[in-house]
């Protein structure tokens, strides 16, 4: 399997930097790719309460902005150093070493306050020691997937992330809100691109996890089958086509970007004006392909496509696909059979578009991150479908579709 050795950055992320990178998504279930996190690391979990209700109220951009804000705040608090994280649509998960825990705690607490005060949403958050997850019989193993030469995204296995999420929902390991006035540094966080309408028929949000007591080999076979089917589709059903990247001014996310501005002492209307001025320049540069110093618009837009985070594994397969109805039906039929066999639990949600939230501290660097979700419910609605299946399975004594 192709791998690339990544350069080590600083002492804080030495372990993570030492994990070999794989660039073939079809190999994501290979156990050798996943390395156990050290016992002194901590898992971070954040999730929007009642995200499905917020999405029904057409606040999906706010929900996605809140989830991406967790990653942006951590990235900025840790000086841009690399650490494993997963964007979940209505939240995020990550892991940090002991020496970064205090800064991670401050950033996460500040983000929960910002989400409440500026977005009007409630975010639960928890910091769970890896050792505690292991004490419950789960593990936390991490791999590094490179969708392009520019970025890597973390993959998690072992069940520890899922256990930590359950602990957070039970109110355990909760992050205490910060003092009034504390704000996270969300520099680089934006959502300037317009919705991306489905080009092949529909946008499918997909969550697949192992059913309780499932045979690991059978679960691996299902995931590999699904990925293999998707790999045969054009561009692996990437919902971010170069031709589909659309900008308008003012952008639909300008208000959210203004709320993410660092200086809370400046009135929101002034911050919004600054964002409008800045994004007008951005719009003209990208719209007309104007080269500015080292910034080449065509290169940047190609990197947006390549760097997009539309596929991942975090104790289960998570994908946002732009696919044909036939492909969506084939995926669902395969999952129905696997669920009937007691191998998987899953949630699907079909919609007409995808949406992108971006983290780009420097437009001239190639490592800008782009988080993808469905625009009409996305991962949150797929998670609701998965929970419904789980509840029905528990009521019947087994998992059934």
Image (cartoon, rainbow, N blue to C red):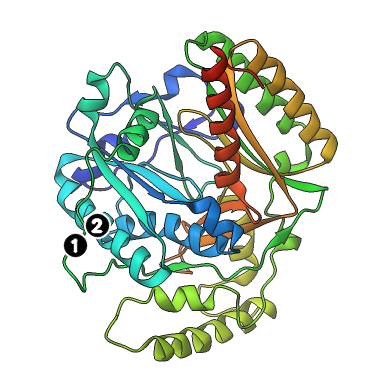
Q: Quadrant of the C terminus?
A: top right
What x and y, as percent, mark residue 348? 66, 37
Locate residue 327 relative to residue 82 in the image: left or right. Answer: right
Residue at image position (64%, 10%) is 341
Given residues 113 and 234, the one toward you in this image is 113
> For mark 2, what is the residue?
109
Locate residue 343 relative to residue 176 in the image: left or right. Answer: right
Given residues 24 and 331, the one toward you in this image is 331
What x and y, as percent, mark residue 281? 56, 86
> For mark 1, what is the residue?
178
Given residues 166 and 236, the one toward you in this image is 166
Residue at image position (61%, 27%) is 26
Residue at image position (69%, 81%) is 288
Q: Quadrant of the N terminus?
A: top right
Q: Is residue 371 visible?
A: no
Q: Are marks 2 and 1 in contact (CB under 8 Å)?
A: yes
Q: Secondary structure at mark 1?
A: loop
Mark 2, other Cα within 10 Å: few <14 / some 14–19 / many ≥20? many
* Distance between the alpha carbons at the discs numbered 2 and 1: 6 Å
Locate residue 208 relative to residue 236 in the image: left or right. Answer: left
Residue at image position (61%, 83%) is 250
């Amino acid at each position: 399997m192709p791998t690339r050795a990544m350069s080590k950055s600083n002492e804080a992320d030495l372990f993570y930097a030492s994990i070999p990178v794989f660039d073939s998504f079809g190999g994501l279930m290979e156990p050798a790719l996943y390395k156990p996190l050290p016992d002194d690391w901590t898992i971070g979990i954040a999730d929007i309460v009642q995200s499905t209700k917020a999405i029904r109220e057409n606040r999906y951009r706010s929900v996605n902005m809140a989830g991406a804000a967790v990653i942006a705040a951590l990235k900025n608090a840790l000086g841009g150093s690399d650490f494993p994280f997963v964007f979940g649509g209505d939240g995020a998960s990550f892991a940090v070493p002991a020496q970064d825990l205090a800064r991670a705690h401050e950033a996460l607490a500040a983000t929960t306050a910002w989400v409440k005060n500026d977005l009007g949403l409630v975010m639960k958050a928890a910091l769970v020691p890896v050792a505690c997850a292991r004490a419950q019989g789960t593990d936390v193993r991490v791999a590094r997937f490179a969708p392009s030469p520019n970025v890597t995204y973390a993959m998690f296995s072992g069940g520890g992330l899922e256990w930590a999420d359950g602990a957070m929902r039970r109110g355990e390991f909760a992050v205490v809100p910060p003092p009034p006035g504390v704000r996270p540094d969300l520099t680089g966080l934006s959502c300037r691109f317009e919705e991306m309408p489905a080009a092949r028929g529909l946008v499918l949000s997909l969550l697949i996890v192992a059913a309780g007591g499932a045979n690991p080999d059978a679960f691996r076979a299902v995931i590999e089958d699904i990925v293999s089917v998707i790999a045969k589709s054009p561009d692996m059903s990437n919902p971010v086509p170069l031709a589909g990247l659309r900008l308008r001014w003012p952008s639909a996310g300008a208000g959210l970007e203004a709320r993410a501005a660092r200086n809370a002492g400046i009135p929101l209307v002034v911050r919004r004006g600054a964002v409008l001025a800045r994004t007008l320049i951005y719009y003209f540069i990208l719209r007309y392909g104007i080269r500015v110093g080292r910034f080449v618009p065509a290169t940047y837009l190609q990197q947006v496509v390549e760097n997009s985070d539309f596929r991942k594994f975090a104790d289960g397969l998570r994908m946002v696909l732009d696919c044909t109805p036939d492909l969506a039906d084939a995926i669902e039929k395969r999952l129905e059979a696997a669920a009937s066999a007691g191998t998987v639990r899953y949630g699907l949600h079909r919609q007409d578009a995808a949406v992108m939230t971006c983290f780009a501290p420097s437009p001239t660097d190639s490592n800008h991150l782009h988080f993808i979700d469905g625009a009409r419910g996305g991962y949150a609605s797929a998670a609701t479908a998965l929970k419904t299946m789980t509840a029905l399975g528990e009521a019947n004594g087994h998992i059934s579709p």
